[in-house]
């Protein structure tokens, strides 16, 4: 049975005992789509090497239908993209869901969404409030006959900024009732009243599904998250832990299994006001 009461403190305690959970199961049936999030740390690994090819091989290992990458561009200057997207497409069939205005970049504030299949209907770039320049990408697409919204973000380092950014994304997605996935490096390891992500409740869940993903060699903090509206869309969340993933970036990728069939079983509900 899934442990629906699992929270970050228990996950951290297990991590400190070197027994960090690698996955959380909510239901085992009907999951047919994989979505993932990966902070690639500008393609610099824990060994200090800049190696985009190594990151691309981890993306191939994950084998996701949709993946959101963070820090896929240089942070300053021309903000050039750091991956060979053509080679990545040849190896994985993943292609970018949008073309940035700055054609040298891969994403928006380093956020890049790649998809293996689906029809992109709309793309929005959102500037997020806060002390540091941060952004999010909102992509509406049709996947396996289902209209789906994917929101990819990289939140700031300051607690107040993260709280503002969570509220901004709720507002940016409130008017559309279609099923929505929110994922990325949200830079928050706390839950309950200490979390800066409380504005996401009750809009997105499962909020308790936190798995340590940082630092990649000895993961202790659940900085990377995948949530959905409705939460029942997610049947499993897992940390991708392989020898290559532990060295390719300072974050481990996380992935979720989605049951798109559940969307045909009940009418869509508007977001809580």
Image: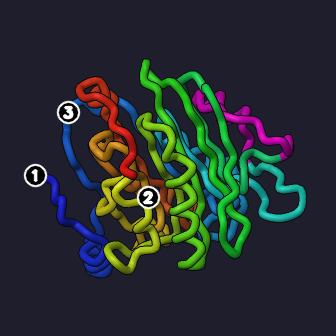
Above or below, 217 against 266 in this view is: below
Mark 3 element type? loop
Residue located at (22% from left, 66% from top):
6
Residue located at (36% from left, 50% from top):
272
Q: Is residue 2 left or right of residue 83?
A: left
Q: Is residue 252 left or right of residue 72?
A: left
Find out whether the residues at labels 1 and 2 contact each other: C-beta distance under 8 Å.
no
Residue 203 lies, in percent from the top left, at 38, 53
Mark 1 element type? loop
Task: Give the number of the disc on residue 225.
Answer: 2
Name the one closer to the observer, 177 or 105: 177
Find out whether the residues at labels 1 and 3 contact each other: C-beta distance under 8 Å.
no
Above or below, 75 against 130 in this view is: above
Whichever of callouts 1 and 3 sits on the residue coming sooner in the sequence is 1
Task: Give the number of the disc on residue 1.
Answer: 1
Residue 39 lies, in percent from the top left, at 58, 58
> Between marks 3 and 2, how big is the CA–CA gap?
22 Å
Let me know if residue 30 is in the magenta part.
no
Question: Can residue 52 be spotted in the picture?
Answer: yes
Whichever of callouts 3 and 2 sits on the residue coming sooner in the sequence is 3
Q: In this view, which residue lies farthest toward the top? A: 145
For the magenta stretch, what is the residue range? Answer: 83-104
Whichever of callouts 1 and 2 sits on the residue coming sooner in the sequence is 1
> Between marks 1 and 2, how big is the CA–CA gap?
22 Å
């Amino acid at each position: 049975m899934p442990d629906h009461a699992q929270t970050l403190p228990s996950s951290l305690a297990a991590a400190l005992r070197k027994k960090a959970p690698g996955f959380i199961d909510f239901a085992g049936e009907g999951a047919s789509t994989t979505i993932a999030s990966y902070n690639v740390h500008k393609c610099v690994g824990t060994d200090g090497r800049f190696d985009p090819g190594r990151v691309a091989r981890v993306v191939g290992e994950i084998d996701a239908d949709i993946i959101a990458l963070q820090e896929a561009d240089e942070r300053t200057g021309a903000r050039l993209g750091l991956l060979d997207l053509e080679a990545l497409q040849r190896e994985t069939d993943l292609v970018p869901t949008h073309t940035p205005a700055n054609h040298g970049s891969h994403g928006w504030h380093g956020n890049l969404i790649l998809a293996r299949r689906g029809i992109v209907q709309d793309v929005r770039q959102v500037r997020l409030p806060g002390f540091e320049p941060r952004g999010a990408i909102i992509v509406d697409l049709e996947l396996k006959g289902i209209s789906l919204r994917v929101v990819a973000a990289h939140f700031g380092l300051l607690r107040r900024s993260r709280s503002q950014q969570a509220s901004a994304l709720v507002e940016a997605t409130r008017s559309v009732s279609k099923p929505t996935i929110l994922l990325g490096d949200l830079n928050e390891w706390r839950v309950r009243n200490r979390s800066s992500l409380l504005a996401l409740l009750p809009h997105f869940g499962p909020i308790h599904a936190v798995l340590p993903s940082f630092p990649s060699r000895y993961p202790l903090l659940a900085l990377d998250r995948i949530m959905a509206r409705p939460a029942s869309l997610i049947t499993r969340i897992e940390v991708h832990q392989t020898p290559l993933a532990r060295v390719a970036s300072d974050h481990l990728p996380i992935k979720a299994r989605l049951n798109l069939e559940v969307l045909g079983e009940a009418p869509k509900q508007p977001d809580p006001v």
